[in-house]
Amino acid sequence: MHAYRIRKRIGRALLYFVLILAAVYTLVPFATIIVTSLRTQRDVLRGPFYTPREWAVTENYIQAWTIGRFDRYFSNSLIMLLITVAGTLIVCTLASYSFAKFRYPGRNALYYVLLLGMMIPFQTIMLPLYFVLKSFGMLNSVPGIGILGIATGLGFGIMMMRSFFVSLPDTLLEAARLDGCSELKVLTHVVLPNTFPAWSSLTVFTAMGSWNNLLAPMLYIFDEAKYPIPYALYAFRGSHSTDYALLSAAMVISIVPIIIIYLVFQSKFQTNLMAGAIKG
Amino acid sequence: MQGVKFKERYNKKQVIAGYLMILPALALFAVFFVYCLVQAFHYSLLDWNGVGSSVFVGLSNYRELFTNDVFWLSFGNNWYYALGIIVFGVFPGMLLAYLLSGPSVRGRAIFRSVYFLPRIISAVVYGMVWVWIYDPRRGLLKKIIDLFGGQSIAMLGDIHTAMLGITITGGWTYFGFCMVIFLAAFMGRDQLLQESALIDGATRLQIFWKIDLPQIKPVINMLIIYTIIDSFKVYDLVLVMTGGGPNNATQIMTYYIYLQAFELNRYGYGSAVAIVLGVFMVIFTILYNYLAERED
């Protein structure tokens, strides 16, 4: 019995050793940028992995924010995110509700065409998109790329919202209709108040995709003043590749909003990313 | 007669409201997907620099890409990346999920949240940090190798290891995500089967191979297809870490399309590559959906 207990102890110790090792492995890059962003620029001249000697708590952040113009990039990203998220919620809610609850000719056929469309990866259509965006005046425009984000997220959003509406009982709607509610009133008074869980999932997923998007801004935005954060970071490194402290501060600024959203909506993040597999 | 039937089957208000509500989605879809897809195919048949006049060349762009070494190199690198992610992401994720699924693991929620973190941040951020880690003179990797007295390596600068470096970083962002998927699968497995096997004197390893693994096999299949789809979309990471170099050693499909079209102004050829990539992805997505539906 004694030997069994010792073996069990060793097993436990080994288990936590592996789990903690994996956690350290995960966190090293995060720790690197946080620590580096808090050091003086002179202190990190030799690189981020030497023992810190001089600390500068706010200096790099202030510089990145003002001289590095990350205030501007941050607001560009925010505008893009708000347009994409708001638009996705509106367009996908309307379409999914229609697909799930109304009956009309061609409904299922249209739904499957949309689903098929979302399998097409963005990379396949990115060249013609350039000319489409240009003809709509959406090229080199932050709101324009925000609207593009609505289109590229359509398939996933509609699929997710539709499965939510399908699970909403029809009797609920019928009762409201019998009480004399118009279709619009059924939607605003009966359906939408129940939609918040699905909306928060879709919001989280869309927000992350928009905030981290590099490819579309890189292809379709040309003025530096209009860069969203990921592209700005990429461009910033081009000219400041060894400015480790400043780059780190900029990187921390760029991940803080998404980490806050993550901590608030954790469970939704984790379940929805798999469903997002099929998003183009 | 037809009219009566229509009236019986459909409610006029619902038909109008229904069409109106899908209109915004359909309009966006028609302009950005249908039109662009048709155009992409159209471009792929042209010799065109994106600005001037174009020449119809039929399928010669496709013929060129199938005999182009860099195209095949990119295609191969995408596969290398996909398989590497399975090694550095899917398997470690499965192992961690297995460990975390034990009956009395403390801090399960915290470990789960931590492992998942890399998945939510931009590839520009983690790509840059990993470039610092791999730095052959000042990097963390060099410090660790020095500790063991080994020979320092230029991970991203050497054509033989550059792709490996990118793949390890890709795996770092991926294993926590796989862990979440596998954890759900392990937690949902049949506990009774396990217990009865333990009573029958089976070892832990035997139970894992013969009882746990078959139960989560559908999830493994799905995740592998998902990984392949995801791996063929990778772009940011390669751009930030190596820019396709050294000497095309880390060239991948999406970046290859970008280079051909936007840097070399070969819109026709770039579009042909894009169409091939699209066909490839649609096939895998259909396969994924098929597996996912069977799972439900």
Image: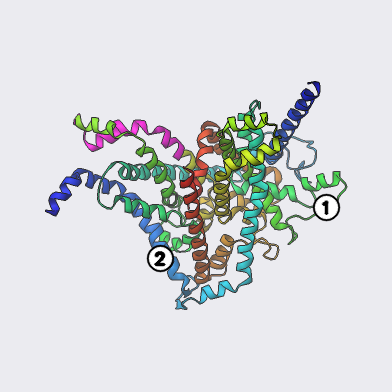
Judging from the image, what secondary structure is the residue with disc 2 in? helix
Q: Nearer the viewer, residue A47 or A198?
A: A198
SS assignment for the magenta stretch, majority: helix
Residue A76 coordinates in the image, percent (x, y): 50, 46
Is A141 displayed left or right of A2 in the figure? Answer: left
Magenta includes B280? no
Indicate whether A227 appears above or below B34: above
**In the image, is A166 to the left or to the right of B211?**
left
Q: Which residues are magenta?
A: A179-202
Instruction: Locate residue B172, reporting x and y percent.
Output: 66, 45
Within 10 Å of the Cα at label 2, are there few (<14), some (14-19), or many (20+) other Cα atoms? few
Question: Picture coordinates of residue A78 (x, y %)?
Answer: 49, 42
Residue B79 seen in this snapshot: yes
What subunit carries mark 2?
B
Q: Residue at x 44, y 40 (%)?
A: A202
Q: Nearer the viewer, residue B135 or B158?
A: B158
Q: Amino acid at mark 2?
A: Val
Looking at this view, is B237 or B84 the one in front? B84
Residue A182 part of the magenta-drawn span? yes
Disc ID at residue B152: 1
Residue drawn at x 35%, y 39% is A166
B254, above or below B129, in the image:
below
Q: Residues within 10 Å of mark 1 (few under 14, many from 20)?
A: some
**At 72% across and 48% down in the image, what residue appears?**
B132
Q: Residue at x 24, y 45 (%)?
A: B17
